[in-house]
Image (spheres, rainbow, N blue to C red):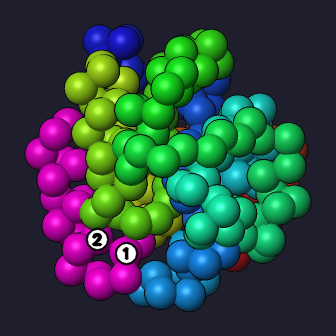
Amino acid sequence: MAADMRQDPLMNADRALLLVVDIQERLLPSIHDGHGIVTTTRLLAQAARRLGVPMLVSEQYPRGLGPTVDALADALAGAERFEKVHFSCALAPGFLDRLAAFGRRELVIVGMEAHICVLQTTLGLRAAGWPCFVVADAVGSRVPANAELALARMTAAGATVVSTEMVVFEWLRQAGTPAFKEISQWVK
């Protein structure tokens, strides 16, 4: 998988899957800039829907942490969802098979908490050979230093840290298209 991605270093909507990790109701209030993370995730989810990028949404023990936040409900409509108790999505029973069934080769990862579920998911997926793009402005922790450490550790493990606008404009590839005209208005 990784060899294919390196032939074209840009993220590509035709190869991508957006993985939304545990952006849940009871967790959000304690996350540093949690509402900013919801905003950037919403933009990515809307762009993914517009460009045909499939989305997969995890929820860590939703009976305790609640469902995915309501503010993302319409943007994530139609996304496949799964519940987990493992911190790493990669360790959740059947997850890797589910992921492979999408037929995509690049994972764009957002979510909470950066130093727990996002980190462990990314490390597990990298170990399984998946190219991972972690969106720095769409992941967070209660303490900003924990998120910074997690991003550094994910980078050291071979994940690529990117921003929301990097994802959106690499998925778009060019200006002047109907998709560009629509999505570029959301970025403003």
* Residue 16 within the segment the image draws in magenta: no
Q: Could you say where residue 93 lies in the image, as x and y percent from the top left?
A: 49, 26
Whole-number angstrom distance, CA of label 2 to CA of label 1: 5 Å
Magenta segment boundaries in residue numbering: 140-159
Q: Secondary structure at mark 1?
A: loop
Q: Could you say where residue 81 lies in the image, as x and y percent from the top left?
A: 71, 41
Instruction: Identify the amino acid type marked 1.
Output: Ser
**Are the two marked residues, 2 and 1, in contact with CB atoms closer than 8 angstroms?**
yes
Picture residue at 82% right of the left edge, 62% below the top: 73
Picture residue at 41% right of the left edge, 45% below the top: 86
Picture residue at 40% right of the left edge, 32% below the top: 90
Label 1 sits on residue: 141
Q: Could you say where residue 181 lies in the image, as x and y percent from the top left?
A: 82, 55
Q: Quadrant of residue 9?
A: top left
Q: Nearer the viewer, residue 151 or 172?
A: 151
Label 2 sits on residue: 147
Q: Quadrant of the C terminus?
A: bottom right
